[in-house]
Image (cartoon, coloured by chain):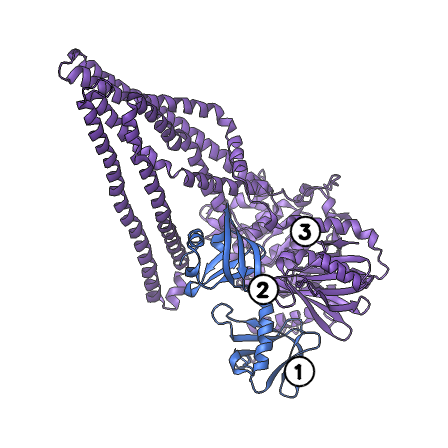
Amino acid sequence: MLIRENIPEYIDKFLREKSVGEIDLAIRSDIDEKEHFGQQWLIVSKRQFYVLAGSDVQSPRILFHFNLDEIKEIKSHPVVGGQIMEIETNSKTYVVMHYTNAVANKFALAIKLINDMIRNPDLHLETIEKWVRTEYERIEKSKSSGLPLPEKHKVARRLFQMSRPFLGSCTLMFSLLLLAVAIDLMPPYLIRVLVDDVLGAGAKHRDWLLWLVLGLLGIQIMRIFITVVNNRISAVVSSQFVFDLRARLFDKLQRIPVDFFDRKQIGGLMSRVSNDTEVLQSFISNISHGFLLNIVLIIGIGIVLFSMNWRLGLFVLIPGPLIMFVTKRYWKYIIRFYNRYWFSRWRINSFLNTRLAGTRVIRAFSQENREIEEFGMRNMRLMEDALAINRSWMTFFPIVSFVFGIGGLLVWYVGGKLVLNNDPLYHISLGTLIAFLSYLGMFYGPLSSLTQLSNWATQILTASHRIFEIFDEPDETIQVQNVIRLPHVRGKVEFSDVSFGYIRYLPVLHKVSFTIEPDEVVGIIGPSGSGKTSIVNLICRFYDVSEGSILIDDVDIRDIDKNDLRKQIGLVLQEPYLFRGTIADNIAYAKPQASKEEIIHAAKVANAHDFIIQMPDGYETRMGEGGAGLSVGERQRISIARAVLRNPRILILDEATSSVDVESERLIQKAINSLIRNRTTFIIAHRLSTLQNVDKVIVIKNGFLKQFGRPQDLIKQEGYYRRFVKIQSELFKLKHGFDLETSKPLSNI
Amino acid sequence: MDGFRTNFLNPKTATFSRGLGGSLQLKIGDEIFYPKVWVFRAFPLSGPSGFISIKNADAEDLPEIGLIEDISKFPATAQELIAEELNKRYFVPVITEVLSIKEAGDRLDWEVVTDKGSRLFTVRAPYEHIRSLKNSKLLITDIHNCRYEIQNYNLLSNKIKDILAKYIYI
């Protein structure tokens, strides 16, 4: 038994009735024969292949039944959201099953297994059982839909763990905060004394006036001092926290596998590194001022109010729930408008972005008016959305202050009554009432802002969760335990039955095999999307093969120390990526300690020296993003110089498809020719001229190796290579009015 | 430019049938026969029944045999066969009821009833994977790249609308 998913009782019974026998393979699809979500079973038993309709509990039935010996091959092809499985027999092709991508990985594994069984009837299933089991478990585990939702308290705990280095500063901030609240509570108390004992009728201490006012001044000075100190500490802590986080995040991003960047959009990642970390910055700064302050204030004022007069305190609380309720409802209502507004803003920004970049296209096709109109529409929506928000805020504020006012009026009335009441049990002084009212003013504000606490917490948790998600990604392919050091690669590269897919069930390379001897130059040609770049990605070990193996100097690439490997591989990309900085920085990117002489030598080899030297700032010319300001050909030569300086044993060159002028092409060609000397070189070629000096050619099409050999042999065969050469020479003739083969000018063009 | 002229299949001469193995077959006139063809929509979202490309599935590069301009011009049997094929290729269940949506980070866990049965699925980065189309229609792509459709956003419950409003612009 290789894989046996949980077979329900009724299917099990049915299989026994049909005496299907011991089952080797049983897996379930998620679409039934009527094209509904449901189940169909693929079952292999005693070299028999069955497809079972299983959605109907009453009557499971066999839809297809083959003897493995009649099957030539099982295939699958992608459709929208899923795959369709086909069985090829000698006479016919049968469409047997349809399933969604959610189960495609395990079906890919099953198809591979069955095909192996077909090809090799003597295959001992026991020998592969363990491998299949682990493969299957890995697939099941990687089903991200089954992942549990992140638990909020876990995220919060992690967040606090991360703030641990700042525990000292945070404690200090919290103590200062308590002190600040205590100070905030003092002025109304002093005002009470001022009214009752200094200003009131029959007051005994008229001479206290100056001292009390000075006391109030002193309190304010202290308060300001504490605020400044506290804010400064919080600014330092929050910036440091985010600095640390961002550094750790970037560090992590450098270590996770390259395919992570294929799966995620770079834009989204940028926002994680910049925005989400900023949200967390607000987390820290909110500890000192903001929610924590508000909570402490509410508690503090509440205690003071009740201890001054609990009856009056109860009246204060009446508008409280009302305010909280109104604010909460209002937020729920307004957040929709905010979302719309953010969307509108984002849309107008992206519109501007693309239209400004595409100005030439707009002018050339004279579509200015349409674009102006389109922009006008978006601008209008933005204005409307902004207006909706403003309008509703402008209504909300007066209402809220009205509710506050009611609370005040209530206290005036009830408190006034108490002041007038002569019963010593109920009587309060005028000073107490006034102090009460000023506490009240400090009480409602924090109360209404507290209603947003949950919004704020959600935002923080979301941002942290997104950041932790990156931290939780596994690092780049884990190195095997006994890595083989290979400090000096000779340069033999061997592909042996290599199959590979970026998504496992969509292979882009099928059983590709070839051997390249050290110092050979290999041209890789084939239509776009055929798998050329995938070969390169595998040699650099950005990815690991799904099946088969790649050997470098007869050692499996997975066993080689990754640093040793990459140190000896040079890569010149199709779209040469140049970083911001000077030309010299870019050439010396992989060898920052290179001397000026070395840099110039590399540039000379790459045929770049002459144009660099003519620039006003020479090698110290600063380049914009991605090398703006230089032509494609110049950028290409700089990136070649970068590879020259690295002096790799294995060189990979992805030739630019974009056409450059004839002279640049010649210069690049010259640069390439001097670069490929004495090293194993792979060139993804688009032009015949590039193939002039290759020892071998690999032709790849739809992921299959179509032709492999010396060019002089391949030219004699009917096939892609010969067509490529023919088309290219005809293009050459058209372009230059010159026949490459006969070296005669074509007079009649 | 003649080589680039769009070749529309003639309802009178192009005959579709189902092969014994289940593949769609196409016969043009009496001479030309394709034992296995695949169908593709040129405008799957805005015009699902027009401009359907018929490709020869037996050839490596899947060359186009011709386009169907309007499927309703074809006889009923052909319409039925092609609809079956399209259903398989564009397996996009229409959500009839959203039972729940759970939000966590930038991920939404859905529990829905569709015209093809109930289903649980997960959408990541909802901003990018919920696309609002014309007439308040929504197209949702889950983490497995499976698609789902909501015919009319306005008919959803307020609770669900409140959640989705954060991610779409209607």
Give the left or right position of residue A1, taking residue A616 as reference. right
What residue is at 31 percent from the left and 38 percent from the top? Answer: A323
Q: Nearer the viewer, mark 1 or mark 3?
A: 3
Q: Are marks 2 and 1 on the same chain?
A: no
Provide the secondary structure element on which disc 2 rests: loop
The amino acid pointed to by label 1 is Phe
Q: Colour of chain B?
A: blue
Asked whether disc 2 touches disc 1, contact meaning CB atoms under 8 Å apart, the reply is no
Q: Colour of chain A?
A: purple
The amino acid pointed to by label 3 is Ile
What residue is at 72 percent from the left and 62 percent from the top? Answer: A42
Provide the secondary structure element on which disc 3 rests: helix
Residue holding disc 3: A139
Residue holding disc 1: B33
Return the residue found at the far left. Answer: A201
Give the left or right position of residue A535, taking residue A127 as reference. left
Q: Nearer the viewer, residue A693 or A341?
A: A341
Counting from the top left corner in percent of width and height, residue A43 is at 75, 61
CA–CA distance in space, label 1 to label 3: 41 Å
**Subunit ID for the residue under disc 3:** A
**Subunit ID for the residue under disc 2:** A
Residue holding disc 2: A80
